[in-house]
């Protein structure tokens, strides 16, 4: 089969906005602002390095889907038939807890005077389910929402930061970007620092969903794979799990290189630049607002505290605006998480049942997992179950270990299944190995700290 010609750059925009949205609800919005406002800007260099690692990891995931026209999970299945069970288990247990939408509900509740955060969280979960169920083409629904919310949210963050930050704050930021030469803050728990570094971006198995999004966007050989459509409003498309390799002719190799340049540029400008700008601005905003003050522990209480300080130093409207931005971004993150996790579990279950289930069942399996997670979240809110410490710990360990696992698998897969001329070069190999070592160290440290 022939590799399709690469289109104009503007037509490629989309998948990286989705992945950017996945990261905004964790490190960008909460974790790094909390750390820098409490321990100073000297550690902000690690956020940039963490995003850079994730850029390399994501591009190797894209390399496989671009050249083979199938998700990376199909490639993993070729390496071992037991891997789908791991990805279903690690994804479900790590992401079933509705903490992101619970935080979003809390922020909206503060703005609109709603005290029953659980009921509001249930409403928002059902709203997400309706949006994802009624959108005719699932990928287009997620992409459009990500584009709208990010392109409105980030400019507002820029405005707030420029309004609040002083010259001395910018100097601290610039110094912090080269802060790796400075002494590490003794009071900063190493586990918290490593967690922030590891999840500067998406995290866990969520990075792997990028292979779905570029396939359904029609990147490279993914043009022939088909898309998941709504079981209520969508037109059924033929979905192919297994892709095809293109013939290694001079023309096809040139087309692959054209695609590769464009997708690297798209991911660099949208994901890398978007993530770095978001982290730097949100951290600078927190630093300029609450540095040196006694703040609550990280999480929603810290964001509310920050909004109060913003309101005190400016106008009440700006504190409210900050909470609304945070609530909207977290809502988008939860929507994208539910989409990504449902895709991951649906395709891996279909791979397990490949001999008896048709690919036409993929949309039904997807919506089964989507509403299973939503119903589970509703039950957790109703029972006021929260997130028990043991399960939070399990989730943290699984997300760390799953990144360690999929980085190693991607390295193995791309150097085994791809033709030599389209395999990663030595520079990317070295960076992937460094990421593999880091996440391995982080995983084992988290486990050692528990036991």
Image (spheres, rainbow, N blue to C red):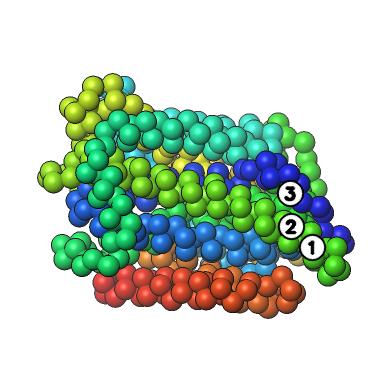
Q: In which quadrant will I find the N terminus? A: bottom right
Disc tally is 3
Instruction: Tell me: 190 left or right of 218.
Output: left
- Which badge, 1 or 3, is on the more N-terminal residue? 3
> Distance of mark 1 from mark 2, alpha carbons?
6 Å
State the mark number for residue 254. Answer: 1
Q: Based on the displayed image, in which of its 4 quarters is residue 14 positioned?
A: top right
Mark 1 or mark 3, which is nearer to you? 1
Vertical order, 196 against 218 (above or below): below
Using a 10 Å C-alpha cutoff, classify the residue at mark 1 as few (fewer than 14 neighbours), some (14 to 19) or many (20 or more).
Answer: some
Q: Which residue is mark 2?
A: 258
Q: In which quadrant will I find the C terminus? A: bottom left
Q: Are marks 1 and 3 in contact (CB under 8 Å)?
A: no
Instruction: Tell me: 371 left or right of 399.
Output: right
> Measured from the top left, where is residue 87 in percent x and y?
54, 63
> Distance of mark 3 from mark 2, alpha carbons?
15 Å
Mark yes or no: residue 121 visible. no
Secondary element at tag 1:
helix
Secondary element at tag 3:
loop
Q: Are marks 3 and 2 in contact (CB under 8 Å)?
A: no
Q: Are marks 1 and 2 in contact (CB under 8 Å)?
A: yes
> Distance of mark 1 from mark 3, alpha carbons?
18 Å
Vertical order, 397 against 23 (above or below): below
Q: Which residue is mark 3?
A: 218
């Amino acid at each position: 089969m022939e590799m399709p010609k690469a289109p104009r750059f503007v037509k490629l925009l989309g998948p990286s906005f989705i992945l950017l949205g996945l990261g905004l609800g964790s490190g960008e919005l909460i974790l790094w602002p909390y750390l820098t406002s409490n321990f100073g800007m000297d550690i902000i260099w690690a956020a940039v390095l963490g995003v850079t690692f994730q850029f390399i990891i994501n591009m190797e995931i894209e390399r496989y889907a671009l050249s083979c026209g199938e998700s990376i999970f199909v490639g993993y299945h070729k390496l071992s038939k037991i891997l789908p069970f791991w990805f279903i288990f690690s994804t479900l247990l790590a992401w079933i807890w509705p903490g992101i939408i619970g935080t979003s509900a809390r922020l909206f509740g503060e703005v609109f005077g709603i005290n029953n955060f659980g009921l509001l969280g249930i409403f928002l979960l059902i709203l997400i389910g309706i949006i994802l169920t009624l959108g005719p083409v699932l990928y287009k629904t997620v992409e459009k929402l990500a584009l709208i919310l990010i392109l409105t949210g980030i400019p507002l963050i820029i405005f707030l930061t420029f309004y609040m930050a002083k010259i001395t704050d910018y100097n601290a930021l610039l110094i912090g970007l080269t802060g790796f030469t400075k002494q590490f803050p003794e009071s900063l728990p190493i586990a918290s620092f490593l967690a922030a570094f590891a999840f500067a971006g998406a995290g866990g198995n969520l990075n792997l969903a990028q292979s779905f999004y570029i396939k359904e966007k029609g990147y490279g050989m993914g043009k022939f794979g088909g898309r998941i459509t709504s079981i209520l409003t969508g037109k059924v498309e033929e979905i192919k799990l297994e892709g095809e390799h293109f013939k290694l002719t001079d023309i096809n190799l040139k087309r692959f290189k054209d695609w590769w340049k464009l997708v690297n540029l798209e991911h660099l400008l949208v994901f890398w630049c978007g993530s770095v700008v978001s982290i730097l601005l949100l951290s600078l905003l927190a630093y300029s607002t609450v540095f040196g003050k006694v703040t609550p522990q990280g999480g929603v209480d810290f964001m509310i505290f920050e909004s109060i300080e913003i309101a005190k130093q400016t106008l009440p409207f700006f504190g409210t605006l900050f909470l609304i931005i945070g609530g909207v971004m977290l809502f988008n993150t939860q929507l994208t998480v539910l989409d990504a996790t449902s895709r991951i579990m649906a395709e891996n279950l279909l791979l397990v049942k490949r001999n008896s289930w048709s690919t036409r069942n993929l949309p039904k399996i997807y919506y089964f997992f989507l509403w299973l997670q939503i119903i589970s979240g509703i039950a957790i809110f109703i029972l006021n179950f929260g997130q028990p410490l043991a399960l939070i710990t399990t989730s943290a360990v699984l997300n760390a270990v799953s990144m360690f696992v999929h980085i190693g698998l991607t390295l193995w897969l791309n150097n085994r299944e791809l033709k030599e001329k389209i395999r990663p070069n030595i520079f990317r190999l070295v960076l992937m190995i460094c990421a593999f070592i880091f996440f391995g160290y982080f995983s084992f440290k988290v486990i050692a700290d528990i036991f």
